[in-house]
Image (tube, rainbow, N blue to C red):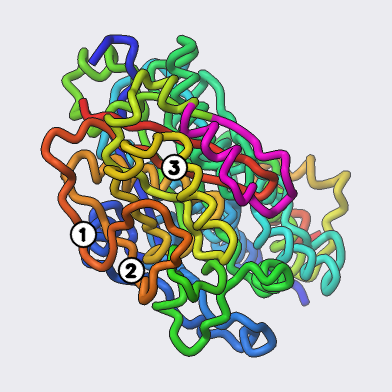
């Protein structure tokens, strides 16, 4: 099932809040997970696993490192 | 008090009796038990149906997202460390002069067991990436160092139920050696799980008094039938006397000295004659520069197992000599807290420090009939005033593996 950009953004906001304690309203498309949201590498693994569950996509390990911003994840899920 | 002394300036604890030091201490003086029946289906398959569950869930005091990456041992240690640090007046300290020594007897065993279940049911990809930093036995030490930016070193001596007493002893040594001015020291345990209860029960080490859990932990009683497993943490702030004086800190007690020994007798049974334990006490006295007749009080390890408690009273008599041993008032706060395993030595050190500070000795509860082999004066049923002019007290902690630690505390 295809997800709209707004749905993905809202879903990512919930995931990031749950895993990293960053309020969902701070999870905006241009933000970098590491530089802006202060999310470490192990939390990124958890976020990826949660995003896979939520949006029904597979994020291979070798592509995870390229998902630097919230927009990158939105694009990946919509691809 | 000399400038080379190490002093205790902050206390923090979370135990089956209360979520902080004040509530734990008042319950100890009231002679109240913190042991409860476990309200879980799994206890029905076990011979033991009760434990000392922490009075306050540490998850209530930490942000939700942090709980995902903190084993319960780490959660307890952080809650207790925050209390101790605030109690010490949140000393300003160069991170390079702040050390941590925080132990656990078992480590993050709840994480190990939970994540193994995840692995078997859902596969490796669903195993938490935080599993290793949650299960490693040094994880509480590392978590506290990270929380308080302590860069002088973070250590985690592991010696079963003597672990957190060894942590405090090592913390004293860390300050004396000049490697730190302030050390956050203590220990934590969170091991109430069916496998752990089954493991200790398989040894026949646990009380099975299921019909009367609050009276199950009964050190020195003739009819004691094993210890009661508990969880929680105790943390102290140790500080060089010079550093404490310079900032005008309140001093609870001098951490005057520590003694270490090993029985090398049996992997789990203590030397029944108390030889190794007495050497730890003797060495603590020597290290502290105290004479036996200056020891007014001993907080005993005394877990309520049939073999352990009586041998310990022999060790006290050997170490202090007959005259001083006759005068010393001995108690076991495990009669109320149960046995916090890796957290026990720190929580009992806090009780010992507060006994000196307030001049009141908590009682040993649940002694209906004193074991005739007990050779020292046990404080029973009601708290007792410390004698006027009492100088010092000892906390004793012993662990599987024959590890013995005694710490001598002195009034400032």
Between residue B77 and residue B351, name the one nearer to us.
B351
The quadrant of the picture occupied by the C terminus of chain B is top left
Circle 1 residue:
B383
Q: Is residue A38 visible?
A: no
Q: Which residue is mark 3?
A: B316
Q: Chain under label 3?
A: B
Q: Quadrant of the rendered structure where residue B2 is?
A: top left
Question: Are discs 2 and 3 located on one and the same chain?
Answer: yes
The region drawn magenta spans: B260-282
User: Do callouts 3 and 1 mark residues in contact (Cβ within 8 Å)?
Assistant: no
Q: Position of residue B27 (x, y in %)?
A: 26, 64
> Residue B378: x and y, percent?
33, 57
Marks 2 & 3, CB-CB < 8 Å contact: no
Q: Residue at x 45, y 27 (%)?
A: B284
Q: Is residue B373 left or right of residue B256?
A: right
Give the image location of residue B360, x and y in percent: 19, 50
- The residue at the point 38 percent across, 42 percent down is B349
Q: As drawn, which residue projects farthest toward the front? A: B322
Q: Nearer the viewer, mark 2 or mark 3?
A: 3
Looking at marks 1 and 2 on the same chain, the residue that comes earlier in the sequence is marked by 2
Query: In front: mark 3 or mark 1?
Result: 3
């Amino acid at each position: 099932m295809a997800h709209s950009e707004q749905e993905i953004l809202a879903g990512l906001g919930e995931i990031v809040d749950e895993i990293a304690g960053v309020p969902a309203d701070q999870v905006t498309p241009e933000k970098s997970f590491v530089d802006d949201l202060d999310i470490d590498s192990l939390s990124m693994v958890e976020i990826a696993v949660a995003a896979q569950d939520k949006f029904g996509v597979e994020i291979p390990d070798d592509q995870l490192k390229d998902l630097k911003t919230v927009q990158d994840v939105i694009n990946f899920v919509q691809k | 008090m000399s400038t080379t002394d190490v002093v205790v300036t902050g206390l923090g604890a979370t135990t089956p009796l209360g979520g902080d030091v004040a509530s734990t201490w008042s319950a100890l003086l009231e002679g109240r038990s913190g042991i409860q029946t476990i309200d879980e289906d799994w206890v029905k398959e076990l011979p033991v149906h009760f434990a000392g569950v922490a009075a306050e869930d540490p998850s209530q005091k930490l942000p939700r997202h942090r709980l995902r990456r903190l084993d319960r041992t780490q959660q307890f240690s952080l809650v207790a460390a925050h209390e101790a640090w605030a109690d010490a007046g949140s000393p300003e300290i160069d991170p390079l002069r702040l050390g941590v020594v925080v132990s656990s007897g078992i480590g993050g065993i709840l994480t190990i067991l939970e994540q193994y279940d995840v692995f078997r049911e859902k596969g490796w990809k669903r195993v938490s990436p935080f599993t290793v930093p949650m299960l490693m036995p040094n994880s509480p030490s590392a978590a506290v160092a990270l929380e308080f930016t302590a860069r002088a070193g973070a250590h985690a001596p592991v010696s079963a139920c003597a672990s957190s007493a060894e942590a405090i002893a090592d913390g004293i040594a860390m300050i004396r050696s000049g490697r730190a001015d302030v050390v956050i020291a203590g220990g934590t345990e969170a091991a109430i799980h069916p496998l752990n209860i089954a493991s200790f029960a398989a040894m026949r080490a646990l009380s099975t008094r299921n019909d009367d859990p609050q009276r199950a932990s009964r050190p020195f009683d003739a009819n004691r039938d094993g210890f009661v497993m508990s969880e929680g943490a105790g943390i102290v702030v140790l500080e060089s006397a010079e550093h404490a004086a310079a900032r005008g800190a309140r001093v609870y007690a001098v951490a005057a000295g520590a003694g270490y020994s090993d029985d090398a007798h049996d992997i789990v049974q203590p030397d029944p004659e108390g030889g190794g334990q007495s050497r730890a006490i003797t060495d603590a006295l020597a290290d502290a520069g105290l004479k036996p007749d200056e020891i007014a009080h001993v907080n005993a390890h005394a877990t309520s197992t049939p073999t352990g408690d009586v041998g310990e009273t022999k060790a006290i008599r050997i170490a202090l000599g007959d005259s001083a041993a006759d005068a010393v008032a001995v108690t076991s706060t495990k009669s109320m807290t149960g046995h916090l395993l890796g957290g026990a030595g720190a929580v009992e050190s806090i009780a010992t420090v507060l006994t000196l500070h307030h001049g009141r000795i908590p009682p040993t509860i649940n002694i209906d009939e004193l074991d005739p082999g007990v050779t020292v004066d046990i404080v029973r049923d009601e708290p007792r005033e410390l004698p006027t002019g009492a100088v010092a007290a000892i906390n004793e902690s012993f662990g599987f593996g024959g590890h013995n630690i005694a710490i001598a505390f002195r009034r400032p």
